[in-house]
Image: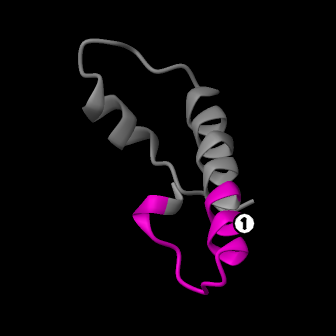
Amino acid sequence: MVELIIKSKIKAAVPDLSVAGEVPDALNKKVLKLLEEAATRAKLNGRRTLQARDI
């Protein structure tokens, strides 16, 4: 699995909270699913370029 999420960046985004160890993995899975769905949309529209509107 590709690691897209960095725990220190999550902590920086929510400085007033502690971040549990499983949060980066869960967030990474959601981001990968979002990207897979966006890639499918781009392909269905005949494009080889992922664009913001696909997300």
Q: Residue 52 in the image: state x and y as whole percent.
A: 41, 62
Which residue appears at 34% of the width and 42% of the height? Answer: 9
Q: Tell me what residue is drawn at x 72 percent, y 72 percent.
A: 44
- Which region is colored magenta? 37-53
In the rendered structure, the answer to whether residue 42 lies left or right of residue 54 reads right
Residue of label 1 = 40
Picture residue at 29% right of the left edge, 23% below the top: 14
Examine the rendered structure and indicate whether residue 21 appears above or below residue 29. above
Q: Would residue 43 be counted in the magenta stretch?
A: yes
- Using the image, determine if residue 10 lies above or below residue 37: above
**Can you name the residue that lies furthest to the front here?**
45
Q: Which of the two residues, 12 or 41, is positioned nearer the viewer here?
A: 41
Name the quarter where the N terminus is drawn: bottom right
Count of numbered badges drawn on the protein: 1
* Residue 48 left/right relative to 8: right
From the viewer's perspective, is 54 left or right of 10?
right
* 43, above or below 55, in the image: below
Q: Badge 1, how many Cα within 10 Å: few under 14, some, many 20+?
A: some
Q: Nearer the viewer, residue 27 or 33?
A: 33
Locate residue 23, reporting x and y percent. 57, 28
- Quarter holding residue 12: top left
- Look at the image and say whether residue 6 sits in the magenta stretch: no
Determine whether the residue tagged by mark 1 lies in a helix, strand or loop. Answer: helix
Mark 1 residue type: Thr
Q: Nearer the viewer, residue 30 or 14?
A: 30
- Colour convention: one colour
Residue at coordinates 54% horizontally, 56% vertically from top-left?
4
Side of 22 relative to 14 (left or right): right
Percent x, y of residue 38: 61, 60
Give percent across and percent down for residue 6.
Answer: 45, 48
For residue 23, above or below residue 20: below
Kindly indicate the quadrant of the structure image that contains residue 13.
top left
